[in-house]
Image (cartoon, rainbow, N blue to C red):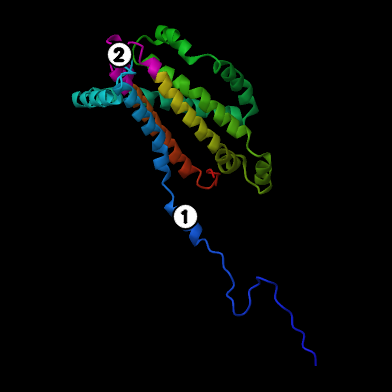
Amino acid sequence: MTVSTERAPTGAPTDRDPIPVTTVQTRTARRENRVPRWIFKLISPIALVVLWQALSSTGVLSDDTLASPATVAGTAVEMWDEGRLQEAIAASLQRVGAGLVIGVGVAIVLATLSGLFRRGEDLIDAPMQMLRTVPVIGLIPLLIIWFGIGEQPKIVLIALAVIFPLYMNIYGGIRNVDAGLVEAAKTLGLGWFAQVRHIILPAAMPNALVGLRYSLGSAWLALVFGETINATAGIGYEMNMAREFFQTDVIVVCLVLYALLGLVADFIVRLLERTLLAWRPAFSGA
């Protein structure tokens, strides 16, 4: 009787050797040891502030040209203690809030009608495409003539700045919905309203939120110009008064306020994206 023996390939596991098992413990440990992302996000702003302070301390930047970060911080504390910052922020937020409510409402209605209905597109889209090329800031003289120099022209200016980017993104989102999904919904017996609710609007939501982020940026930009129209309160009013007296520290404080409020608004929209688009996994970077 012949017994044949075969040698296992070199490096192959045998009965005496444990089978190597690849685990993710090392990879997980590496991820846990990584530096948090928020630290990297702070590196660039902190480096710019340090460079700015260094240039001011060495005399490269004079206070007449640009106040140092230390001076700006001191001015911000003084304005806060006097109540000027709170009053300015409250006035500006009221204007932006009113303009956003009007602009978002109008944009949603027009984009929905234009995106869902061909007749709506024929009646709405062409005028919107023409008007969006008109500089909103160029409308300030007309707004003053139509609404005076009170709060109305400021709010209307912000609303106009919000309408067009939001309209374009919602309209594009609706029209870019996969036709195959709509046909599948029809095959399953979904009615028109059910198709809009369960297929079209959810698919257009990512574009709508992108448009909202653009609109918020446009709203703050329009506010800067709007508060030059005979404003008696607000961040823009403080900037204009500081310009008259060459107070660069106050101007920088106002600019930082605009930036911080814009970041807060963008953060809120990002939270909405995570909530409303939780069903839609997306690439988050390598």
Q: Amino acid at mark 2?
A: Asp
Residue placed most toward the observer, 86 or 192: 86
Q: Position of residue 249 (x, y in %)?
A: 29, 19
Instruction: Give the vertical position of 92 relative to 19 (above or below).
Output: above
View extreme (right): residue: 1
Q: Quadrant where the C terminus lies?
A: top right
Residue placed most toward the observer, 283 or 94: 283
Identity of the residue drawn at 55% across and 30% down = 169
Q: Main secondary structure of the magenta part?
A: helix
In what element is the residue under mark 1? helix
Quadrant location of residue 51? top left
Q: Position of residue 131 (x, y in %)?
A: 55, 16
Residue 226, magenta (yes or no): yes
* The residue stretch that appears in magenta: 224-253
Identity of the residue drawn at 39% across and 14% down = 153
In the rendered image, which residue does mark 2 sit on? 64
Residue 229's tag is none
Quadrant location of residue 96? top left
Q: Is residue 110 visible?
A: no
Identity of the residue drawn at 54% across and 37% down = 206
View extreme (bottom): residue: 1
Instruction: Give the vertical position of 77 relative to 279 (above or below).
Output: above
Q: Residues within 10 Å of mark 1 (few under 14, many from 20)?
A: few
Q: Amino acid at mark 1?
A: Arg
In the rendered image, which residue does mark 1 sit on? 30
Q: Residues within 10 Å of mark 2 (few under 14, many from 20)?
A: few
Residue 200, magenta (yes or no): no
In what element is the residue under mark 2? loop
View extreme (left): residue: 82
Identity of the residue drawn at 64% across and 25% down = 119
Q: Quadrant where the N terminus lies?
A: bottom right
Q: Is residue 210 visible?
A: yes
